[in-house]
Each structure stands twice: as C-alpha cells, then as structure tokens.
Image (spheres, grey):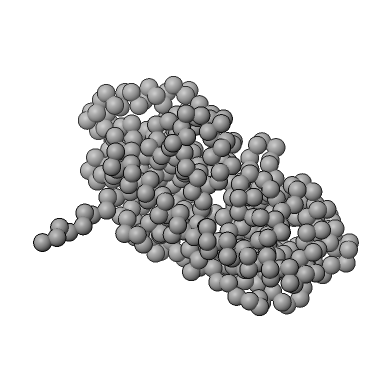
Amino acid sequence: MEAPPSPIPTVGYIASTWPRLSQTFVLSEVLAMERKGVPLRIFSVKDPGGEPVHARVAQVRADVTYLAFSGRRKRILRGNLEIARARPGRYVRALLHALSYARIGVVKHFFQAAYLANLLRRQPVAHLHAHFATAPALVAMFTSELSGIPYSFTAHARDIYVDTRPRLLRAEIERARAVVTVSEYNRSYLLSEISPGSNDKVHCIYNGLDLSEYAFRWPRASALEPLTILSVARLIAKKGLEDLIDAASILQRRGQDFRVEIIGTGPLRPALETRAALLGLSDHVSFLGAQPQERVRHAYQQAAIFALPCVVAGDGDRDGIPTVLLEAMASGLPVISTPVSGIPELIESGRDGLLVAPNKPELLADALDGLLNGAQLRERLARAAREKIESRFQIEHSSRKLLSLFQAGESQ
C-alpha cells in the first residue's frame, strides 16, 4: 500500500494587528496559504481598534491569539515564569539580548514573545512568519530564541526605512531562516545598507492579488461624465496627495470637468481638506474616509483613472510597491504614479501606466489631462496593466514561492 501523504506542518503568522483594514496583502496571503492546505495559526501583537473589517476575514479558518498586554498581564507574566523555569538558559540569554538594545519597547516585545513561546510548548508550530520588521519580527525573533522554532519575516516599507533601527533590523535578518521583501529596490537596500552578508537569505517576493476578486470589464461604467480620478491611500505624507490636490487645481483652471475621490483616513486628512477648500475644489474633491475592501473594489469599477503620486517623505518614509496600484491595474484602471522605490518594477511608463516625477503637480496634471482626454490611451494602458498583473502579480504565484521558503526551513 502507498503511504498516506505526510500532513503539512502548521505555520504561525505573526501580525501587528489582526485584522487590519489597510493590510489587505496579509489577508490575501493567509487565505492563499489556507487554499493550499497549510494549517495556520495567527498571533496578533495588538488588539484590533474597532475599524471596519473586510468581509473576507470571515473566510479565514485559522485560530487567532492576541498577545497585547491589555487584559492579559497576568497571563503574560505567568507564561514568562513558566518558560523561564522550563528553559532557564534560553530565557536568560534571550532577555539579555533584548536588554542590550536599551529600549523599553524591545523588552516589552520580549515578554510577549516569551508568552507566545510558552503557548507553543503545548501547541507547537513548525515555522513562524511575521509581517513587518517592527514588533511582529521582534516577537518572532525572540520566540525563536526561546523555542528553537525557525522564523522568517516580510519587510515592507516604513518598517525598513524609518521604524526599525539598523542594528535591530540587522539582528532580525541574521537570525532569521529567510527574509522576504516586496521589491528588488528594498532587497538592494537591505543588502547594501543593513546586512551585506545575507544575500542568500533575503528574497524579493512581490505582493500578489487574488484576481477572482478584481473584475476586468470593458467598456467601463466610467464612460459617464464627469470622469472620476480615484486614489486609495492612508492620508500620510509619502502618498503625495497634496500633489494630487494641487494637480486638480491646475486641471480646474484648464477647464477640465472631473471629480477626485480619495478613499482612506489618516493624520493629514484635516490639512488636505483645508487645502482643497482653499483652492476652491470643494465641488471637485471628495474625501470618503476608510472603506472596507468591497466598497473599494466598487470604486475601482466606477472610476476612470487611478492616481497615487508617491513621494519620499521628509523622515525618509516611502512605499514599497503599494498594493492599491496592483488592485487598480487588475480592475481595469489606467494608473498614474511616480518612480519612487519599487514602483517602476510594477509600472512601465507608457506601456501599462504612467510615471511622473514626484513633487511635480504640474507634470501630474499633464498626465491626468492626457488620460481625461484620451479614451483610447486609457483603454490601452488598462489592458496592458491587467495583463501584467495576471502574468506576474497573482497571489498564487507569490504564496507558492513563500511556502517553498517555509518548507526549505523545515528541511534544514
């Protein structure tokens, strides 16, 4: 008789907050892994904050364990005492490692990791994977030190360039079994500036989309006038939305008939609304706030153009490859962005989208003008964009590559 196939080992996913409205890429990856038959457990460093939740969260089968201190201080203390008694040498070494960074936040995440390591003594996983090089990767690193379970993590954007000190990021990389990042631009930065000796373990795996969620139809509903320019983003500096509002003012002065809809929330919303009002754009620019993914997908279908003029913020923050660009391209929208960080790895300007220099509202207005006046150009770019997403940015492709890294770690 042929032996039954070996069961697929369980993978533990460590997220900053589960579920998180803005992190659709984590949700898509979890669902893709479950479709491949991978048993998952999810560990959330923070409790959710009451924001809207995507309907697809209900499809996730994995159990979720929260590690936040609020309401769990006694359990976390008890878990630390138990793991310290069971593995005193590992506990002391890992605690000294955490203390060496002289940062209260690092020590706090050590205690969360010790609590998690104790939970994993009873219900083990074969591999840990964290999203973001901030708290999730820290928890994964210390949990690995305490438990011996190998870990990997995906580094995205702000977590690389702003939020994680180089020494800490270097330790996370060098102790990990594998490191994933979402663009070759990021990979080059990590290898040149953070950990030059880690070439074999740092991998670029692009975020992918479940294309069944993004319909491509032509002709579009956007044939209705006035045409809508859509942007979906957190309202923060690196998204370049000031430039979009300034470009809208230029288009208004040129006599263009259009609307701008901005989906998302963030600390810059009051300033952006004030800017739009001062420029006399109240009838042209709408701020729609945070929306669940179902509403965002509907907005993609109704719009004519998608614009996200990303910049490098004053503190160095920048995007990797914004997932909303992939979503818009998959939905049949011609996209305009900037050649910041990894975006040129997604968009070939003139072929499947348009790239304009960052911090140049007049150039952005010119590009928008050309698309507003050019139905054939919009269609040509949109069709090429959908083709690129289908060939290179499907979630089944990226999740297969990621799973191979997990399984390679298990075999070592």
Side (left or right) of 205 relative to 364: left
Residue 277 visible to the viewer: no
Q: Which of 349 and 116 is in front in this view?
A: 349
Quadrant in the picture for the N terminus: bottom left
Residue 244 x/y as whole percent: 75, 55
Quadrant in the picture for the C terminus: top left
Residue drawn at x 47%, y 29% is 197
Residue 127 x/y as whole percent: 32, 44
In the image, residue 111 sits, relative to residue 370, either above or below, namely above
Image label count = 0
Quarter assignment of residue 78 = top left
Residue 64 visible to the viewer: yes
Residue drawn at x 47%, y 38% is 202
Residue 40 x/y as whole percent: 33, 53
In the image, residue 199 sits, relative to residue 290, either above or below, namely above
Residue drawn at x 42%, y 23% is 99
Q: Which of 286 and 384 is in front in this view?
A: 384
Quarter assignment of residue 128 = top left
| Residue lying at the far left of the rendered structure | 1
Residue 338 x/y as whole percent: 70, 50
Residue drawn at x 32%, y 47% is 407
In the image, residue 74 sits, relative to residue 367, either above or below, namely above
Q: Nearer the viewer, residue 303 or 199?
A: 199
In the image, residue 150 sits, relative to residue 322, either above or below, namely above
